[in-house]
Image (cartoon, helix red, strand yellow):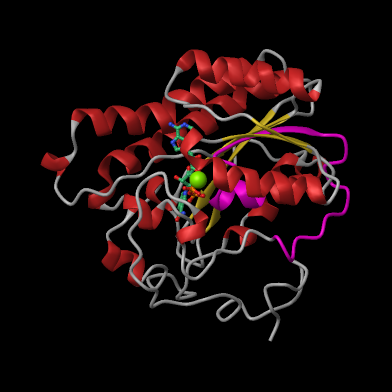
């Protein structure tokens, strides 16, 4: 059987390529860390092999310390891009281990911690990333907040506001700022979810933002292309990241995470990074306004 250390393009049986539930219950506080996840997630550290697909490119990735964003940062760096990574200050440990990994193999990474709920920070982040990399031509909007509540009455106004700010407002602030300085050929990639198609009742506020991200992506793509900039989105199904055990799901759901997909397991971040590479690279030059689903076989529409 192919192992997770084999190159990402190795032929393998997708059903058994990675851990399957049941998983141990493993509560941790938000925003969560990969250090506390059991089994350890795979971000492609030992498997992603680059082939120059993003040589010379300059990418800003939000939520890049852990999970999907971390796998994207590793893949982009190995494809030859310089990367700037944003995350919350509480996530410094995951960010530092990413920096050591990328720099240790000759890649270029700049860490830019800070809270995306703040408009001035979001706009400053885009311009500081462009300054640090001498330009910006890829923006991966990936940071997200997800807090499960079984009853709508338990969703506080504060939670609703924070989820909207993190998932929707920050996307608008950053994309608008990036469009002012990105050259033709650039790419903006948003991160929606299967929750943006089939909402779970316990993820009401989160699912609402994921529908909004779809709409934003499809609408913006039509005008950004007038500047030669492609805007696309990714819709993940269940992926094994700290978002879930840190309050994104109940521990019962974490225990059986991914079991409702036809593949009967969650995806690993390493399995979604290649889609972000595709949408950023010139290979996808005729793709705009697309939402690419990676759901373990579960239909998204
Ligand atoms: P993750 O916890 O590893 O990453 C989310 C990141 O969001 C955190 O690392 C954190 O740095 C960032 N973040 C949250 N609030 C922030 C704030 N106020 N300011 C700055 N950064 C903030 O989890 P992940 O699953 O890799 O999440 C990445 C994206 O994928 C999210 O948009 C999430 O909604 C989406 N997604 C995940 C799944 C899944 O099953 N894991 C499914 C569908 C969509
Ligand atoms: Mg994190």
Name the image quarter holding residue 28.
Answer: bottom left
Comparing 11 with 34, the one in front is 34
Please name the predominant secondary structure of the magenta segment in the image: loop
User: Please, is residue 169 above or below residue 43 in the view?
Assistant: above
**46 is within the stretch colored magenta:** yes
- Residue in view at x 69 percent, y 40 percent: 287
Q: Position of residue 129 (x, y in %)?
A: 69, 23
User: Please, is residue 139 above or below residue 40 in the view?
Assistant: above
- Residue in view at x 45 percent, y 76 percent: 264
Please report the bounds of the magenta region as a residue range: 45-72
**280 is within the stretch colored magenta:** no
- Residue in view at x 66 percent, y 16 percent: 127
Question: Is residue 292 something that shows in the picture?
Answer: no
Q: Position of residue 198 (x, y in %)?
A: 35, 52
Q: Position of residue 275 (x, y in %)?
A: 66, 52
User: Please, is residue 104 above or below residue 85 in the view?
Assistant: below
Extreme residue toward the left, this view: 153
250 sits to left or right of 293? left
Looking at the image, how many numbered discs can be counted on the residues? 0
Comparing 68 with 36, the one in front is 36
Question: Is residue 43 something that shows in the picture?
Answer: yes
98 sits to left or right of 264? right
Name the image quarter holding residue 147.
Answer: top left
């Amino acid at each position: 059987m192919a192992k997770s250390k084999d190159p990402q393009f190795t032929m393998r049986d997708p059903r058994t390529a990675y851990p399957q539930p049941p998983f141990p219950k493993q509560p941790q506080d938000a925003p969560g860390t990969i250090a506390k996840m059991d089994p350890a997630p795979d971000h492609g550290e030992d498997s992603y092999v680059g082939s120059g697909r993003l040589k010379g490119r300059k990418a800003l990735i939000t939520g890049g310390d852990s999970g999907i964003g971390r796998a994207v940062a590793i893949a982009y760096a190995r494809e030859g891009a310089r990367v700037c990574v944003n995350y919350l200050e509480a996530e410094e440990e995951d960010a530092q281990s990413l920096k050591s990994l990328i720099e240790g193999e000759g890649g270029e990474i700049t860490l830019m911690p800070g809270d995306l709920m703040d408009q001035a920070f979001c706009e400053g982040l885009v311009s500081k990333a462009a300054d640090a990399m001498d330009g910006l031509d890829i923006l991966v909007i990936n940071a997200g907040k997800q807090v499960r509540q079984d009853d709508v009455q338990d969703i506080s106004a504060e939670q609703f506001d924070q989820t909207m700010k993190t998932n929707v407002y920050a996307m608008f602030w950053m994309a608008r700022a990036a469009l002012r300085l990105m050259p033709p050929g650039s790419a903006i990639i948003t991160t929606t979810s299967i929750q943006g198609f089939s909402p779970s009742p316990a993820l009401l506020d989160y699912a609402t933002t994921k529908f909004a991200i779809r709409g934003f992506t499809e609408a913006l793509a039509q005008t950004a292309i007038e500047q030669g900039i492609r805007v696309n989105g990714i819709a993940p199904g269940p992926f094994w990241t700290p978002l879930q055990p840190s309050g994104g799901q109940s521990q019962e759901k974490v225990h059986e995470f991914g079991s409702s997909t036809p593949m009967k397991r969650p995806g690993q971040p390493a399995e979604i990074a290649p889609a972000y590479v595709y949408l950023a690279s010139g290979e996808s030059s005729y793709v705009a306004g697309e939402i690419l689903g990676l759901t373990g076989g579960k239909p998204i529409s």
